[in-house]
Image (cartoon, rainbow, N blue to C red):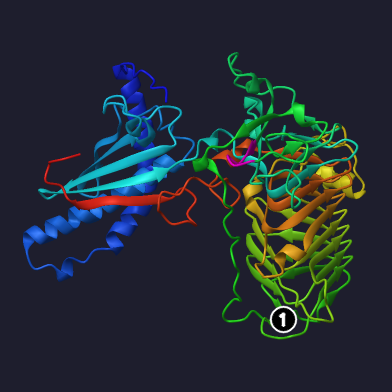
Amino acid sequence: MTVHAIHPVRTSARRGAALILTVFAMLVVGTATLAFAASRHTAFLVSRNAAGSMRARELADSGLEVAKAILRSDQTGWRTKHVGGKLLSNYALDGGTVTVSLVDIRKREAGASAAMSVPDASTTEVEVRVTAERDGSKWSSLSHMSIPQVVKGQYAIFANKLLWMFGSNNQVGRWSRAPKSAEQRRVNLGTQADFAFANFSGVWIDSDVQFEQTALPVDPADARTLKSTWVYYPYNGGTNLWGASFPINGPGRDKVATVRMSPDESIRMVQAPQPSPTTPAPPGITGGNSITSGTRTMTPFRVGSPTGSTNTNLTTNNCTLLLTAGTYEVYGAWNASNATIRIQGPVKIVVQPKWSLFNLSPVGLNWSNTTVELTTDADLEVNNGYRLVMNRCWIGSYFQCVGESDPTRATGDPHMKAWMGRGFSTTACDTASPDEPRYLEPWRIRIYPIRSILSALFAWNFTDTSVIGSLFLPSSSIYVAGASQVYGRIAADSVFIDGTSRFRYDHALDDIVGLTEGRAPNRGGDPDEMFPVRPIRWGPDKGTGP
């Protein structure tokens, strides 16, 4: 392993680094302090010394939470903005002080000295020492953390088994309207497939697939940086039927750079969140489960029963639904056609059809010619059971052009109007039909499957549909076909991109810890935690030993 020289840090740089880390620490202190206050057990202490030791112990716990928040963020630059390995030095926290020191585990294991084992830009395995002092008592904790280096560009598309891009003109690149698009970061794709097309696994890139032309930074010594898109594959990727030594093939293979992950970087997708029925149960829909006209403001409802054995479907055709904050449950299929669904506030939709011998291919969401529009304060999570079918739909933001005097023209995303054939006309905001929808943070729209033993048997189909959001199907397949557009990211057991579909990644997702990121190596911590932490040592600090 190459050991990089550590250069002296100027005083101004040290002050700037300390200021950045201190400001970030202040942002997370509130949460950490709540945990600290909630965990007090001083009522059980009978001596003053014991009480001081307990406070120092709790302060060390809070200090570790602050450190974890700093290390898990892609905005703090902790790898290079420490001072000689010190992330925080005598940082004032809840009546005491906290010092956080970092060590690059791999450097140390390679034999580097303590001075040369401080983190640098390549660090992924870090030892975290937290020393807390309060009321004359000290407490320290030592933990190992795994921070994946792929935060330089998280996986835009991740396919556990098979990623197949084919068709007449697929496009994979950056979302030009996204704020970070100007940085021209590379787009990363990933797979856990270790053998191309054996047992239907691997990556296939057709000759007509288009990628970005440029990406930064470019390293003249690394030919891979000349490619805008990198495809990561597992370290144990084997020789396929064509003799290639990695599971990435197709006539367009040379358009991307291929990167073999180390054993520590192999990916294991976590489970999707499992929704549970709300308690008490929300009421049903006034007037029945079929809405075929008009505009209705809805409060949380339940259609059907979570414990029943039959399906109770919801039908919404030729209408506008305004969903206010809360959870909406359908135990059957939600069939929608020519509908507008406007999300107002934080909304969760749970659609769980029943599988039976009489319903062998159950569909949760079955939507056509339907739009989903989020207002400025809205957040949407969809939990769908079994199949999902969207045909000529649009999911994005509810946009109003402030400078447009005609209220009909001002209301609605112009991209949506053109996409859905709903009377696009020029406005003060758009003098021509836009090629992309208005920007909306993709993490505000999350679409998950409901876990079941039959999940792998059913696929999600998006045809001629435009979606902003994060699509996560750890045990199911997704088909993006026709002229579909996806703005955000996709992670699924298998991903098929066909027709003239386009995929656009928002690099702001690099900074969002969520279910669709690649897994970090697990050093013994919680396997379902994104960046696992393994406690090594924890106890009173006597001032001796490392």
Q: Quadrant of the C terminus?
A: top left
Direction from residue 193 to residue 435 in the image, left or right: right
Is residue 29 in view? no
Q: Residue at x 41, y 31 (%)?
A: 79
Determine crowd level at label 1: few under 14, some 14-19, many 20+ residues with C-alpha closer than 10 A.
some
Q: Nearer the viewer, residue 97 or 157?
A: 157
Q: Position of residue 395 (x, y in %)?
A: 77, 52
Name the quadrant containing residue 47: bottom left
Give, as a single range, the part of the protein colored magenta. Answer: 232-237
Between 389 and 259, the residue placed more toward the observer is 259
Image spot of residue 309 (x, y percent) = 74, 85
Q: Amino acid at mark 1?
A: Gly
Please report the residue visible at 68 percent of the width from the left and 66 percent of the height from the top: 349
From the top left corner, tell me how far across and down residue 144 is, in percent.
Answer: 35, 45
User: What secondary structure is the magenta-colored segment mainly?
Assistant: loop
Inspect the magenta stretch and tell me whether residue 400 lies in it. no
Q: What secondary structure is found at the residue carrying circle 1?
A: loop
Give above or below for 391 relative to 97. Answer: below
Is 234 covered by the magenta stretch?
Answer: yes
Query: Where does the image place residue 192, in percent across and percent down from the top left?
Result: 63, 46
Q: Nearer the viewer, residue 215 or 432?
A: 215
Callout count: 1
Q: Quadrant of the N terminus?
A: top left
Mark 1 lies on residue:
284
Residue positioned 59% across, 21% down in the render: 217
Compared across the picture, whether 439 is left or right of 205 comes to left
Residue at figure coordinates x 34%, y 53% from the top left? 32
**Residue 454 visible in the current orientation:** yes
Q: Name the outermost residue toward the top.
A: 220
